[in-house]
Amino acid sequence: MNLAEQVYQAIQPLPEPMVQEVLDFALFLRQREERPEWHNLMLAQASSLADWDNAEDEVWNDVPAI
């Protein structure tokens, strides 16, 4: 069974509103891949977040969330 068939099998028992959400998300993913500005935005976010992962910030790793 290929991946598309697995997705179909997984959504078959879902109620119609949930299937619509799955479809909306799939269409969003397709649109995102077709628009280069989305890709550029994701690359910019990844590079800026990489700056946050450094030894100086290790002290914050054990701070509990409020």
Image (tube, rainbow, N blue to C red):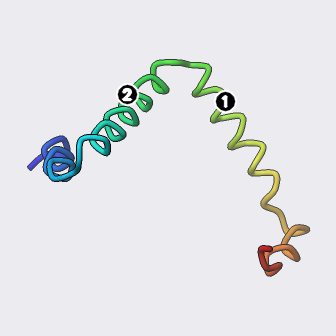
- Identify the secondary structure beneath mark 2: helix
Mark 1 lies on a secondary structure that is: helix
Front residue of this view, candidates 41 and 25: 25
Residue closer to the observer: 29 or 65: 65
- Which residue occupies 65% across, 35% down? 43
Label 1: few (<14), some or many (≥20) within 10 Å? few
Q: Which mark is in front, 1 or 2? A: 2
- Across and down, in percent, residue 59 comes to 88, 77
**Location of residue 21 (image quadrant):** top left
38 lies above or below 25: above
The residue depicted at 81 percent of the width and 56 percent of the height is 52
Label 2: how many Cα within 10 Å (few below 14, some 14–19, many 20+): few
Give the labeled residue for mark 1: 41
User: Quadrant of the image for the C terminus?
Assistant: bottom right
Front residue of this view, candidates 16 and 2: 16
Q: Amino acid at mark 1?
A: Leu
Q: Residue at x 44, y 22 (%)?
A: 31
| Residue 49 appears left or right of 26 | right
Q: Position of residue 25 (x, y in %)?
A: 40, 36
Q: Tell me which numbered mark, 1 or 2, is placed earlier along the sequence.
A: 2
Closer-to-camera residue (21/47)? 21
Q: Which residue is the extreme one toward the left? A: 1
Q: Say which mark, if any, is on residue 61.
A: none
Left of 5 or right of it: where is 43? right
| Location of residue 8 (image quadrant) | top left
Q: Which residue: 37% across, 28% down?
A: 27
Q: Give the residue type that dot 2 points to.
A: Leu
* Residues marked 1 and 2 touching at CB (< 8 Å): no
Q: Which mark is residue 27?
A: 2
Q: Gap between marks 1 and 2, in whole Å?
A: 19 Å
| Relative horizontal placement of residue 64, taking residue 24 as reference (left or right) | right
Q: Position of residue 23 (x, y in %)?
A: 31, 34
